[in-house]
Amino acid sequence: MAKTKFFRVAVEGATTDGRVIERDWIDQMAAGYNPETYTARINCEHLRGFSPDKPFNAYGSIVAVKAEDFALQLDGKSQTRRALYAQFDVNDQLVEINRAGQKLFSSVEIAPNFAATGKAGLVGLAVTDNPASLGTEMLAFSAAKPMIDGFKSKPDSLISASVEFAFELEQAEPDAATGAFAAMKTFFERFTTSTPAPATPVAPAPAGTPPATPPANDNFAQLAEGIRLLGAGVTALSTKLDTDVGVLRTELGTLKTQLGSTEQPGGTRPPATGAEASKYATDC
């Protein structure tokens, strides 16, 4: 899973079923959203599948939201609107879909009376291709609203008009081993990329002057630092390997246990015990 940066997912104004997202609702959703209380999940076109298989599986979760004003250009004029911004924790499937130019818009699902609090709450979000497909075109037909209602988690929920978005993933933090070896690389590059200072001419010593004592090697501290970084990198790598090997051992042990308790395919014939002597014996 990968976290995105915050981007706009909803704006005060029209919804797909003709109602309006109020400005206060944006602020209430931002102030009251807590994934530990209720996690809004991401789906495709507001369709919640029962199977983990695509295309109607869940694509991730909303981990945080906030409200901000932004300038909307409408009819050649700038209008200040309240907007909801969200941060996603998405799976690789949604990242690939978005990068392929598919499902470029978001549409949030809002509960106007979330958990009987009297305040609006964010209960879901869908990715969609065409903002008009859940907006103007459907509202033009009397049969359209029941179609939208069928997508909702609750009948009184609202589905917003879609807003275009693009993923910008946060940079993942390197593990300890990677960070240690990167620091070592930077350290040793100082010895290979530095430009030597030009030599300063030295005046010849007067006759009879004893030779000067050669200067002590002043690279010892730098060498010690390099050795320390090398040791830290080896330690971090060893710890990571121990952890990975431990996980593999656990998984292998579980697999062996499962295979040992699984009946092999095909029927098995019971061992032959021979004929019953009393049944086939003759009286001579």
Image (tube, rainbow, N blue to C red):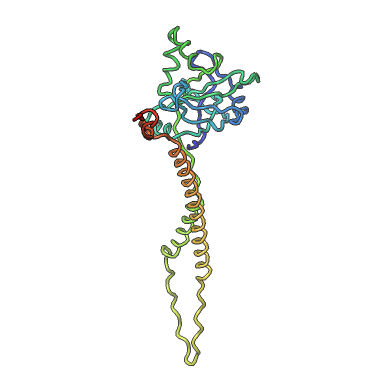
- Residue 282 spot, x, y in % from top left: 35, 29
Which residue is farthest front?
A: 284
Out of 102 and 280, give the one closest to the viewer.
280
Quadrant including the C terminus: top left
Out of 201 and 122, give the one closest to the viewer.
122
Which residue is farthest right?
A: 117
In the rendered image, which quarter is residue 144 located in?
top left
Residue 8 sits above or below residue 153 on the image:
below
Residue 187 sits above or below residue 113 on the image:
below
Out of 251 and 244, give the one closest to the viewer.
251
Which residue is farthest top?
A: 142
The residue lying at 57 percent from left, 19 percent from top is 111
Residue 30 sits above or below residue 14 on the image:
below
- Residue 168 spot, x, y in % from top left: 46, 37
- Residue 248 spot, x, y in % from top left: 46, 46
- Residue 156 spot, x, y in % from top left: 56, 14
The residue lying at 41 percent from left, 21 percent from top is 130
Out of 246 and 27, give the one closest to the viewer.
246
User: Total number of numbered labels?
Assistant: 0
Is 119 left or right of 267, judged from the image as shown?
right
